[in-house]
Image (tube, grey):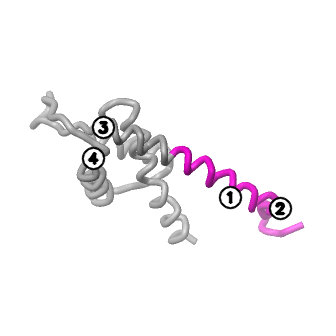
Amino acid sequence: MENTRSQMRKGVLELCILAIISERPAYPSDILERLKAADLLVVEGTLYPLLTRLKDAGYLSYTWQESRSGPPRKYYALSESGHAFLAELVTGWRGLIGSVETCLQGVRPPEPDGSES
């Protein structure tokens, strides 16, 4: 079951990362913190390749900002095409949610004690 949950989380990770960055330019550790708060546990080894891929696709840009506690930091922001791509992903996600909810209408979760009634 954990593998299935992991695959579902990976499927929405790109959407969540773009949504976080759309609010304001973000440093990768800030993105990881927000994902963790949303119970989407991600490691740096997953995040950095995804950020690079989104940047290479033209959806993200970055700037270097000075840090008080070390070297300059790379902050990511959505490009114009990134905003358009995010809007398409959100539309697709909302449509998918509606489709899945339609399929789940007759499904009831099991009782807390594990028995079905």
Disc 3 and disc 4 in contact, CB within 8 angstroms: yes
Q: Is residue 87 left or right of residue 78?
A: right
Q: How far apart are the alpha carbons under marks 1 and 3?
A: 31 Å
Which class describes the residues within 10 Å of circle 1: few (<14), some (14-19), or many (20+)?
Answer: few
Q: Amino acid at mark 2?
A: Gly
Image coordinates of residue 102 in percent, x first then y, are 75, 57
- The extreme left residue here reads 71
Q: Is residue 48 left or right of residue 82?
A: left
Question: Mark number for residue 100?
Answer: 1
Question: Mark number for residue 106?
Answer: 2
Provide the residue designation for mark 4: 58
Q: How far apart are the alpha carbons under marks 3 and 2?
A: 42 Å
**Residue 98 colored magenta?**
yes
Q: Residue at x 19, y 39 (%)?
A: 74
Task: Indicate the secondary structure of the residue bearing disc 2.
Answer: loop
Q: Which residues are magenta?
A: 90-117
Question: Mark number for residue 79?
Answer: 3
Q: Amino acid at mark 1?
A: Val
